[in-house]
Image (cartoon, rainbow, N blue to C red):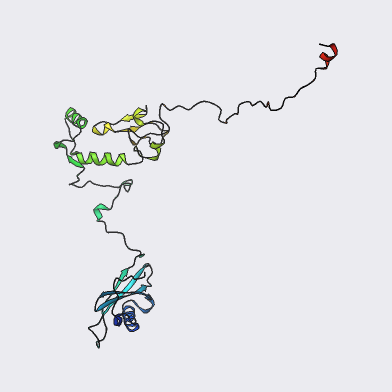
Amino acid sequence: MTATPTRQPDPALADPEAVQLARAAAEEEAGEERVGDHVGTVAEDDVSATHLFEAQHAGYRGWNWAVTVAFAGPGTPLSVSEVVLLPGEDALVAPEWVPWHERVRAGDLGVGDLLPAPEDDPRLAPGYVGSDDPAVEEVALEVGLGRVRVLSREGVLDAAQRWHGGDFGPRSEMARSAPATCGTCGFYTRIAGSLGAAFGVCANEMTPADGHVVHVEYGCGAHSEVEVEGGPLVPVAEVVYDDAVLDVEANTAADESGK
């Protein structure tokens, strides 16, 4: 790290004696072998400046020992205000803290793992409130039973947005090169409920989307109505006649008979 101060420190704070005082403070804190080269000086204000030294700690690449020195004016000795270890611009730092209850991500759930939904999960609503899905309500009434919680409107929209932008959405590379969309494919099975207006399940075992929720505008090369033009696999050139040279042969029998 090379410091780029916005103001120049007082000469008394940047002279060799100040650097030596700062180094001694850093070595007292970290040990002589763990304090590297002096890499910059940053003016804090009119009476203090921070000296930066490379940190020679394993696992702390790009970090610096920062020692702030100050003085009260001409004729007064320099003093050390603080000694801290700070990351530089290229330092390896720990990732941003994520609360424990938010650390599980999509795809982390394995065999035998349990992942209970939070009590206040906005994607779910109590079953007696309604599901915003006529098909779900119809089944619940017919059977006479209901689930404790069902998808809320937010949960439906969240799923639709995630599926639309996923690998089986209309903007995927496979969909952009497909000859037709899933909405016109015989292997497309529409799902029930409000999500069925835009999503279904692929039932073609020959495609990477088999068994996955696909958007109605997704598509692949295994569309049920796709056709391939017949013909030889290796192109065959048309017969070519070379008429640039004309060969003439005398008819000996005709010449002898005079005909």
Q: Is residue 8 above or below residue 109?
A: below
Q: Quadrant of residue 54?
A: bottom left
Place of residue 110 in the rendered image (x, y in percent of width and height, measured from the top left): 33, 47
Place of residue 37 in the rendered image (x, y in percent of width and height, measured from the top left): 39, 76
Q: Residue at x 25, y 52 (%)?
A: 102
Q: Is residue 45 above or below residue 109?
A: below
Q: Which residue in the rendered view is the most extreme toward the bottom? A: 75
Quadrant occupied by the N terminus: bottom left
Quadrant occupied by the C terminus: top right
- Residue 152 visible within the image: no
- Residue 130 visible within the image: yes
Q: Is residue 254 left or right of residue 122?
A: right
Place of residue 83 in the rendered image (x, y in percent of width and height, measured from the top left): 28, 76
Q: Which residue in the rendered view is the most extreme toward the left? A: 129
Q: Residue at x 21, y 43 (%)?
A: 123
Toward the viewer: 140 or 40?
A: 40
Place of residue 186 in the rendered image (x, y in percent of width and height, measured from the top left): 37, 26
Q: Residue at x 14, y 37 (%)?
A: 129
Q: Is residue 112 left or right of residue 237?
A: left
Q: Which residue in the rendered view is the most extreme toward the right? A: 256
Q: Is residue 38 above or below residue 135?
A: below
Toward the viewer: 32 or 238?
A: 238
Q: Quadrant of residue 166?
A: top left
So how many labels did they put on this image? Answer: 0
Q: Quadrant of residue 23?
A: bottom left
